[in-house]
Amino acid sequence: MEMGAAKVWGEAGRWLVIALIQLAKAVLRMFLLIWFKAGIQTSPPIVPLDREAQAQPLDGEHSPGSHEPSYVGKRSNRVVRTLQNSPSLHSRHWGAPQEWEIRQKQQQEELSTPPTPLGLQETIAESLYIARPLLHLLSLGFWGQRSWTPWLLSGVVDMTSLSLLSDRKSLTRRERLELRRRTILLLYYLLRSPFYDRFSEAKILFLLQLLADHVPGVGLVARPLMDYLPSWQKIYFYSWG
């Protein structure tokens, strides 16, 4: 949508579409946080469907809570499913029965675990994370794209949100993974203007050129990446969205 708006309506239309999308995302996320008590909002927001686990009970041969008859080797202690109790080929898994049952149990618990209730501090931290794109856009409009202020403001808001949430111990596995993902995404600030324009661009392109010239085969990936990186960096939703 951003690139289409830029082609049809120019830069003004592009920034209008960006602002409308970020505003809609922020409003809906705040609605989930305040009204529905959704807690720390993970990405993706819905647990991906494990099709193997869903297909397994359809054969009627065993269910997640059942124990499959199996043979345990006397010397190796290796667990082997008997041929009579093997599922059909399209839904067969190749792990030990106990491992399969443990994994299915973990997935069921993950799906049924409610989000961790947030206190005032955690709610403020999540609100800062949700509002960060809007604050960045407002600062861009006020100080301009070449100013360091939007970059610094966005980074401070992200780090403040993470520091306030890091004190919370009783988080679910998905919520801990989400905080880890947000921490890793801080590396994107190396690819965001104006830091990228003044510091990162020359070093990254020099490193890619060095690898392409001296490491066989790397040039097939590095040279197209060098051509694509400047265009990627100019698209808002690739680097900031």
Image (cartoon, rainbow, N blue to C red):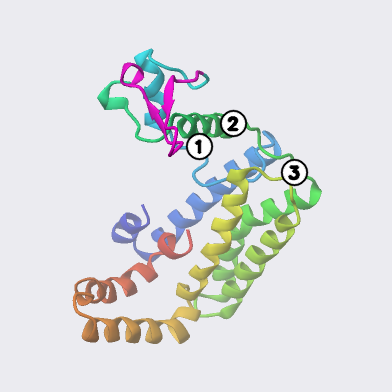
> Can residue 137 be seen from the camera position used here?
no
* Residue at left offset 23%, top offset 86%: 214
> On screen, 171 above or below 111?
below
Residue type at numbered disc 1: Ile
Residue count near mark 3 (Cα–Cα under 10 Å), binned few <14, some 14–19, many ≥20:
some
Single out the mark in the foreground, 2 or 1. 2
Residue type at numbered disc 2: Glu
Residue that badge 1 annotates: 46
Which is more toward the observer, 203 or 233? 203
Residue type at numbered disc 3: Leu
The span shown in magenta is 66-86
Q: Position of residue 152 (x, y in %)?
A: 61, 75
User: Rounded to the nearest whole Å, what is the CA distance between mark 3 and mark 1?
Assistant: 19 Å
Q: Is residue 214 left or right of residue 147?
A: left
Q: Residue furthest top?
A: 60
Which is more toward the observer, 232 or 225? 225
Residue that badge 2 annotates: 109
Element type at mark 1: loop
Q: Position of residue 185 (x, y in %)?
A: 52, 63
Residue count near mark 2 (Cα–Cα under 10 Å), binned few <14, some 14–19, many ≥20:
few
Residue that badge 3 annotates: 118
User: Rounded to the nearest whole Å, what is the CA distance between mark 2 and mark 3?
Assistant: 20 Å
Query: Which circle's residue, 3 or 1, is located before the other in the chain?
Result: 1
Element type at mark 2: helix
